[in-house]
Structure formats: C-alpha cells, structure tokens
Amino acid sequence: MYEQLLDEAVANGLTVIEKYPFESARIRGLCCDDTIAISAQVDTAAERTVVLCEELTHALHSYGNILHDGRMERRTQERIFDRLVGLGGLVKASAAGCRETWEFAEFFGVPERFFNNVMENYRERYGVMKKIKSGGEEFVLSFEPTFRIRKLCTTRHKQKMIRKERAV
C-alpha cells in the first residue's frame, strides 16, 4: 500500500521526502505546498503508510492552515480510515480468516493502535451495526459489544435452503 501511495503522490505532482530529520519528535509528517516530509523517527512500514496517507489526504483535500480546525482534521481522519481499512476491507479481512485485532492490523498493513482507532470511529459513525454490500453479497457488521461480521441470506437463497430441508 505504501508504494501505491507514493505513486499517487508523484502522479499528483507531489514530492515525498522520506526520513526527514525534524527537530521535534512529535512531528511524524508534514505537508507544505507540493512537498510531503515523513519523519526519520517513523521506523515501521505500517506507520509510514499511515503517515503518508494522512499527509497525502491533507495535500489533496485540505487548504489553508488546518492546524486548529477540528472538523477538517476529523474529516481527514475518516477519509484515511476508509481508505486504508474501509467497511468492505473488513469483510475481505474476515473472509481471509482475520479474527483478532492484530490479525486485522497485519492484513491492512497498519499499526494495531491505528486499527483500534478505526474501529472506534466506525462505532461512533455507524452505531451498533451497519449493513453493507460487498462483492454482490450483503453483510451486517456489528460493532457492539464485540466486532462481528455476518453474511445475510437473500430471500431466493433462503427459499432454496427451505426446499432442501423439506426434501430431507
């Protein structure tokens, strides 16, 4: 995913400086004009992916000084969550066998802390559960009390199942 983000940055005329020596350890990444800098202290690929995605999102969707604009920052975070994980991505990860938080984080190539933030955001945005379509099928994602994904059966599929049960 990191390489895709780098390619997108270049395609949009942005320069990415990796391992920039910021004086403050608190700065993980920065976007200014047409340049994105990623701190040298960001040492894992998963963290670099998140930082680059955040700065790329700022570069493409923000304008002006947003340091004190909480709404703009929240919108940016939600775009990042949807891009790096997404509801459809949760379905794919579950189908691939992910059950634990660390497995989902590893599947998406993001830090576990970031994945926990994604799930908390989805609970806030969608409430207890969310119904989605993915790959032509319908699923219900439950966020409370624990995260679960259930596949919905269509009426036609239910009728086939009932016929099979009666035949037995």
Image (cartoon, rainbow, N blue to C red):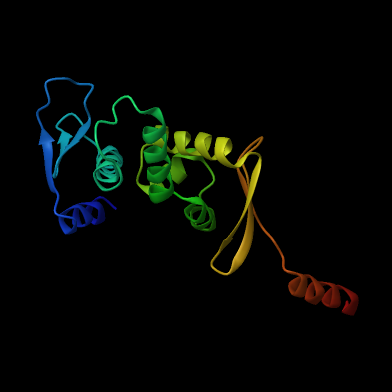
Task: Please give left or right for residue 33 compared with residue 98 in the image.
Answer: left
Q: Position of residue 158 (x, y in %)?
A: 78, 70
Task: Look at the picture and state if 95 lies above or below 85.
Answer: below
Q: Position of residue 33 (x, y in %)?
A: 14, 41
- Please count the marks in the image: 0
Q: Which residue occupies the foreground of this view, 60 or 114? A: 60
Picture residue at 25% right of the left edge, 56% below the top: 4
Task: Please give left or right for residue 6 compared with residue 82 in the image.
Answer: left
Picture residue at 25% right of the left edge, 50% below the top: 2
The image quadrant that residue 66 belongs to is top left
Task: Look at the picture and state if 24 lies above or below 98.
Answer: above
Q: Position of residue 120 (x, y in %)?
A: 52, 34
Image quarter hosting the C terminus = bottom right
Task: Please give left or right for residue 52 compared with residue 101 in the image.
Answer: left
Task: Please give left or right for residue 117 compared with residue 123 in the image.
Answer: left
Q: Position of residue 167 (x, y in %)?
A: 88, 79
Picture residue at 65% right of the left edge, 37% below the top: 144
